[in-house]
Amino acid sequence: MSFSGKNYFSGNIVGITIGIILVVIAFTNYKHSYYNNSERVIEWDVKSYYAYLPVFFIYHDPMLKFRDEDPEKFGNLIWPIYLETGKPTMVYSIGMSVLYSPFFFAAHAVALLTDYEADGYSTPYRFALTFSAFFYLWIGLIFLTRILRKYFKDKIISIVLFVLVFGTNMYYYSTYEAPMTHIGNFAMITAFIWLTIRFYEKPSLKAIILPGLLAGLIVLVRPSNIIVLVLFFLWDIKSFNEFKNRILFFLNRSHWVALMAFLFILVWVPQFVYWHWVSGKIFFNAYTLRNETFSFDNPQIFNILFSYRKGWLIYTPLMILSIAGIFLLPRRIPGLLFSLVLFSVLNIYILSSWWSWWYGGSFGLRSFIDSYGLMAIPLACLTEFVLQKKKLFKYAYLTLIILILSLNQFQTWQYKNGLIHFDAMNKATYWEIFLRTHGTERYWNILEESKAEYLKTDTENAEKTRMKREAKNNAKI
């Protein structure tokens, strides 16, 4: 095909769409240039996700003596918890450090060859972490394209890719808080779905190796994402008979499952070694040291979906269209209905059971970004369905898409500029600031009231959680 003219552009619409997305992401990163600010990029949770790399590969000091020797520099860059053993530990697992590692080592080489300080925290490292999300977004979009091409034409795929990035908080977490876990998880889960499809197209012992390793890494980054195994084992099941046949399929190939389990655990070996070193236990949950846990008997399902504080469908209304598309799956892609619905129900239940169902300071419910590769499929179903209708429906749908995309971009700007608070919004503050470029006196007043109310409620809930956990521990004793 010629690299000029109408045929080229129409035949490469998906590639052009991905190119546009990446250019916008790169330009946004260049424009904000947070990597030039020593207070940005490696901040909040990222400090603990990332700390393993400089600790082990630059300072070779898991006891963090270098931190104690220079608390002015490192005291606020590394947030350990000291155990009864006297050893410091990071709360989070090493999963994100694994994803960061290629970019970390490249940055370290640059720092060693230039005048930048090779301390793990200077500009090259911050730049590398920022653009690690750029890379994983690219990978995720490539695998998502491969998945969607199994079912849809390129025009539909292009619309879905563009809207998925710019009509949701994916854009924000690809740029302004790029090193958070979510874009990496999006890429891995999307790649895992693609490997699952390939496995069932041509099942073999060899084809189960990569899914086993990748599943282990996905869970190492975020343990609650272990439910991706639901997608692997239940993919493309259309009836109860097929479900029974799937069980027999794996029972007759138990050595395949054993290999997958072995590879899954293999990825976790460095984590087990570290946990054993700090605590004397192979399995160790550092979250409990901060009274952070799941309350599976009290899931905040309504709040996580509809609360003005951080409700998923309030701050990411595009996903309402994706959920609507699920009802088209029985006719359009029947083999996906069971696994997608089960995964989604489990995902909502697990995420809403976390003690901090609003997931701290964030734009929207960021924890759902991980599964957007899967949710893109029913979104594509709905988009295809509507665009096949009469012009009135087609134009109405495209107008709705544009409005949702515009709202998301505007609210991203509001959040970035402090007009949408990171964890204290309520119905009154939401509608008072809706589509405004400046906060009103009333907005700031009711925001202060909201902060005080949430602080009181969160403190009370945290105390209840602590007492409940202590009661369980005492019962065990």
Image: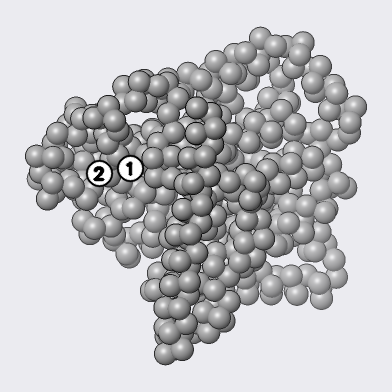
Residue 367 vertical placement versus 224 (above, below): below
Q: Identify which residue, 376 or 273, lies in the foreground.
A: 273
Look at 43% across and 45% down and name the residue there: 291
Is residue 18 visible in the rendered image? The answer is no
**In the picture provided, is 209 more to the left or to the right than 242?**
left
Label 1: element kind: helix
Name which quarter of the figure residue 159 lies in: bottom right
Residue at the bottom extreme?
Answer: 441
Residue drawn at (77%, 10%), measured in percent from left and top? 252
Scheme of colours in the image: one colour
Q: Quadrant of residue 230?
A: top right
**In the rendered image, is residue 257 in sight?**
yes
Could you tell me which residue is drawn at 59 percent across and 34 percent down?
Answer: 226
Q: Which residue is mark 1?
A: 48
Residue 35 position within the rendered picture, expressed as x and y whole percent measured from the top left: 27, 55
Q: Position of residue 37 (x, y in %)?
A: 22, 59
Q: Residues within 10 Å of mark 2 (few under 14, many from 20)?
A: many
Q: Secondary structure at mark 2?
A: loop
What residue is drawn where x is 35% and y is 47%? 46
Name the amino acid type tagged 1: Ser
**2 and 1 marks in contact (CB < 8 Å):** yes
Q: N-terminal of the two: label 2 or label 1?
A: 1
C-alpha separation, residue under disc 2 versus residue under disc 1: 6 Å
Q: Residue 180: x, y in percent? A: 41, 49
Mark 2 highlights which residue?
Answer: 78
Q: Position of residue 363 (x, y in %)?
A: 48, 63
